[in-house]
Amino acid sequence: GVVFVDQNGTPRGSAGTKTMGGGGSKVLDAHRKNLCKQAISGSETWKDKETKMLETFKAWDTDNSGSITKDELQEVFTRLGCKVSSSELQKVLKDADADKDSKISYEEFVAWLCRAPHLEHYFKLSEDILKRNMKDAMAMQQKMQKEIEKSDNPLAAMMKIGVKLEAVQKKGQERIDKELKPVIQKTFQYHDKVLSYDESIIFFSNYAERLGPFAKSMAELATTQAMNACEIKVDMSSIQKEFDKEFDKCLTGYTSDIDKRHKAAWDALDVNKDGKLQEAEIIEALLHGHPKNQQFMKALGLLVEDKSMTAAGPSAKVEMPMEDCQVQ
């Protein structure tokens, strides 16, 4: 994942950011959001954001112990004028304290403060919707294949397949738009319906972190269904390994050039060129099947191009009974 630094300023691994962000009441979520906005305010680069996070952590860690205690957390809320009850404070500590040692380390602090509510739900729902869409398309293909086999005019039957598959694709896109849009709106409402550049640094990195598992899962499913459509027996592990390798290569490129990628993504989304991202701009970028979605992923450098997968061909063991897939 993305490289962060620890409290000594040395690089460490993935932030392990929890992107669900529920973990508390709306009031606590609002407090966390405001604390995060204050911590990263004015950041122009990834290093800026990390530096500001580290400075904020050290300011909260008043005894310089390298971790934040419950009492220090209470001091922060009090100092910032946030009214938090004892039970709410305990809930915050429980939510942030991943290793359950009753204190918050720097890594836990970053993961808690940078949490992106609803983003994990967005990816889970995306996977569910796309699986349903693929299932519908597969059912239609199988149905039409039988009609071709029975037809006296296979060419006419083939043309019908195209029309019906277009209808299935249209229905699938409508499903994506209808079901995902409310979740994206909730994700964006967390940022007060306007995303500033400093906030986009965290938003983009959270998106990139969650995109990997989702993209790999969907690539495996899509390839399997495509092969099954023609009853092709293939060593799926080689194809999946190739996709994983290509995506990991993309992710490495993203991590090593993160500021440039974030700037490219920002420029791609900021259609109005007003220095902030509006809800409509984010929705268009996160709706699968829309050109802006691919443009967004490509700007981040996280879009695996089809041509990158051609290398999987020679390494995959494929057995294809041609009579099962030929046009009569």
Image (spheres, helix red, strand yellow):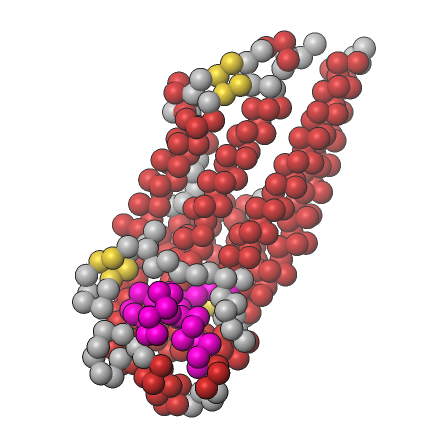
Q: Quadrant of the C terminus?
A: top right
Identify the image quadrant of residue 164.
top right
| Percent x, y of residue 277 | 49, 64
Q: Residue at x 57, y 60 (%)?
A: 184
Does residue 93 show up magenta in the picture? yes
The tally of labels here is 0
| Percent x, y of residue 193 | 54, 70
Residue 196: tell me if it is visible.
no
Q: Residue at x 26, y 71 (%)?
A: 54
Q: Camera-side residue: 256 or 75?
A: 75
Left or right: 3 with respect to 98? left
Q: Is residue 92 above or below residue 8?
A: below
Q: What stretch of residues is rendered in magenta? A: 89-117
Q: Camera-side residue: 294 or 220?
A: 220
Left or right: 144 with respect to 184? right
Q: Residue at x 63, y 46 (%)?
A: 129
